[in-house]
Amino acid sequence: MIDLHTHSTASDGTLTPEALVDLAADQGLAAIALTDHDTVEGVPAALARGALCGLHVIPGVELSVHWDGSGQMHILGYYLRTDDTRLCERLGWLRDRRRERAQRIVEKLRGLGIQISFARVEGLAGGESIGRPHVARALLEAGAVGSLGEAFGRFLSPGRPGYESKEELGVEEGIGLVKASGGAAVLAHPATLKLNPAALAGCLKELKAFGLDGLEAVWSGHSAQQMAQFQALACNLDLLATGGSDFHGDNKPEIKLGTGRRNNVQVPDTLLDVLRQHCHKGAAAGA
Ligand code: AMP
Ligand code: FE
Ligand code: FE
Ligand code: ZN
């Protein structure tokens, strides 16, 4: 079994890339993709550890992209060249915007009388990609909330007083960046687009025209019915159906590496060859 959606301390997971790889190997997984938000910082360490313990590590990323809908769209990139100049430049731009946004969030919270500092948020982030989960940790540490969930519910979610929106790439640019760096592009957790089946099919056709290779049919937050629906959709549209847990360590303790939420994620390693062939096909076609 494999897991194609995991986060490390390079973004908002709580395990270092090395510890993540060790856990995957201990669990008997054959491979994991490291898909941190807006950074590939953790990839070299994960690859090195994977080589040591015999676990196949797929260099990956998860990009939040802007589109004309109300839900959230994330694009996963697999097997990309993590030293691609354009990719690194755009990821760096996104992380600069994340940093500024975190500063604005901290200012808003301080305006509410909550004593947290940006320096502490940065320290808790550790890695390059600062996000709301790091602010949530700072709020927990300061005693302003009793749990990470409460931090989001009271302060950090849209409509709450500490919310700030995030700068995102356009969807065409996001998919293009992944493809241009030799990778395969996959729509993460289609359910978060909040589209009915017909609208989702239309949206996927548009994304396919931009170069999309697949969709993440299997994901911790999908119901069995959604997984079946997304698998069928992938088949109909000639897209790959992939899967992963979206493991974040203690930041989302109910989600387990390789198995998701109550074992609802099972991804066979036969998918790896299909994914790799797809990358080669894309590279050969000059995509
Ligand atoms: P950001 O990328 O900074 O907007 O933060 C988004 C991340 O926050 C997601 O990837 C999740 O890891 C986390 N997140 C979002 N909503 C919640 C929530 N209600 N409880 C815990 N974590 C959350
Ligand atoms: Fe996350
Ligand atoms: Fe996501
Ligand atoms: Zn994720």
Image (cartoon, rainbow, N blue to C red):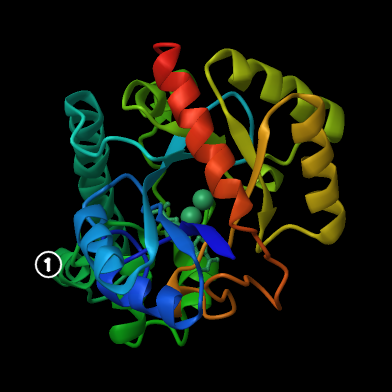
Q: Quadrant of residue 145?
A: bottom left
Q: Is residue 263 left or right of residue 158?
A: right
Q: Quadrant of residue 175?
A: top left
Tag 1 secondary structure: helix
The quadrant in which the C terminus is found is top left
Q: Is residue 271 above or below residue 199?
A: below
* Image quarter for ligand 2: bottom left
Q: Which residue is at a point 35% across and 35% down the rendered structure image?
A: 167
Q: Position of residue 207 (x, y in %)?
A: 60, 21
Q: Is residue 285 above or below residue 75?
A: above
Residue in front for this viewpoint, 135 or 85: 85
Q: Position of residue 46 (x, y in %)?
A: 27, 62
Q: Is residue 159 left or right of residue 92?
A: right
Q: Which residue is at a point 68% across and 61% down the rendered structure image?
A: 221
Q: Is residue 67 visible?
A: yes
Q: What is the crowding at mark 1: few (fewer than 14 residues within 10 Å), some, or many (at least 20)?
A: few
Residue in front for this viewpoint, 31 or 246: 31
Q: Is residue 209 left or right of residue 175?
A: right
Residue extending furthest left?
Answer: 119
Task: Tell whether circle 1 marks a residue whose Cβ is less than 8 angstroms from ligand 1.
Answer: no
Q: Is residue 14 visible?
A: no
Q: Which residue is at a point 61% across and 19% down the rendered structure image?
A: 208
Q: Position of residue 154 (x, y in %)?
A: 51, 69
